[in-house]
Image (tube, helix red, strand yellow):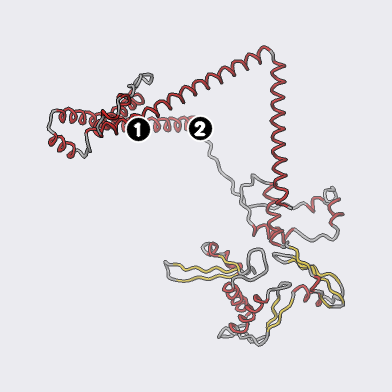
Amino acid sequence: MPPIMSKYRDRKIGKTFSFAGADCFADTTAKGHIRNAFEQGTGIVSNWDVMEHVLDYIFLKLGMNDSDGAVDVPVVMTEAVANLPYSRKSMTEIIFECYGAPSLAYGIDSLFSYRHNQGKTGLVVSSSYTSTHIIPVYNSKALLGQATRLNWGGYHGSEYLLKLIRLKYPAFTGKLNVSQAEHMLKDHCYVSDAYENEIKGYLDWTGLEDRDIVIQYPFTEEVIVQKSEEELARIAERKKESGRRLQEQAAKMRLEKLMKKEQDLEYYKTLQEQIANETKKETRRLLDSNEIKDEAQLEKMIKELDKAIRKARIKDVGGDPEEEEEAPNFDLLDVPDDQLDETQLKAKRQQRLMKSNHDARARAKAEKEAEKARIEEEERLDNERRENDLESWLDEKRQARLEALQKIKERDRLKQDLEAPSRR
């Protein structure tokens, strides 16, 4: 059984559910709460709560625990080669304090198996889920000081098989997982006694059908309903009609916004004419009632509304896009600062900023038009060369292609040279 557990609380019914081992995969909600007793990729226990839960499950299934949960028989626990003292100490505390076992012994499972099979001198190869240990044995004595650990186990084999399947069938409709790859590894893979000889004759016609393994993945056929030409035409017409209605609704909303802006513009223009002949006190009252700071802000609002209305008319009502816009006014830039008041100085700084932006846009527009004219001229000359001197044109294109490929190879070589020290 896998050393995993899952525990969650169902708030609707007010109950807590806990699962251990393969039972964690039987419940849909439990799959999202799975915790492993061992650290990922190692044989070292890192979650002792999970380990205790798994041991409870094991002793319960074996029927070894008493009514109070104690285990009254000696326990033999296998462990990995060179297990950490802290890990062994924690396991010993759990076995004696939680289960009250009378005695506990540790050992290596592969050496138990070798001794059981009457082995005397040899090399024990033990492949586990996360690693493989090679232990030499001489005269029934294990030379643990000469043992070797390889970071390759059943988990890595399943991952490698899964990668090979995904590489060979990239367009596979189903989604394979590690659990399915583990079942394939256990059912169809084996350790070869003569690997080189088997590989040489593996594709021979003799016995190829027996060696060929076909695995049927659950398949659900997709039923495609064939529609007649009339039905397709009706669907297309409905889509077209729906699109037309959406366009009409959008145009109507834009028109309503345009009318609202025109009304606001007319109102603010009337307000501007009204305050022109009023006293300062009445002007201040009118501006405050419309939440306007001063006359400059009113003027700015009128200009922005007028600009937005003209742009909307060009887009929606069919105005002339080539119509020249009103040239910006920079009349304060030529007036000395000592002849201006505080408000005019502020307006002059704003005009200076606007003029710089206006000039920058004009330069960018001119550069864009010049670049466009240059590209068009190059395309025209290139087309003339292709029509008048095709062989020379082809030679030039081939040379440009070779230079581009050479640059790509040089870039890849430099990249490999930069990565080489890090790999070393």
Determine whether, in the image, residue 280 is placed left or right of residue 390: left
* Farthest residue, direction top: 388
The total of numbered circles placed on residues is 2
Q: Nearer the viewer, mark 1 or mark 2?
A: 1
> Quick one: label 1 or label 2, which is nearer the N terminus?
2
Q: Is residue 251 visible?
A: yes
Determine the secondary structure under disc 1.
Answer: helix
* Mark 1, residue position: 250
Residue 79's tag is none
Q: Is residue 329 visible?
A: no
Instruction: Using the image as rendered, state which of residue 329 and residue 90 is in the foreground.
Output: 329
Determine whether, in the image, residue 135 is placed left or right of residue 102: right
Going by the numbered disc 2, the residue's amino acid type is: Ser
Determine the secondary structure under disc 2.
Answer: loop
Instruction: Using the image as rendered, state which of residue 151 and residue 351 is in the foreground.
Output: 351
Residue 59, given in percent of the width and then of the height, sits at 62, 79
Q: Quadrant of residue 136?
A: bottom right
Instruction: Using the image as rendered, state which of residue 36 and residue 279 is in the foreground.
Output: 279
Residue 416, given in percent of the width and then of the height, sits at 72, 44
* Mark 2, residue position: 228
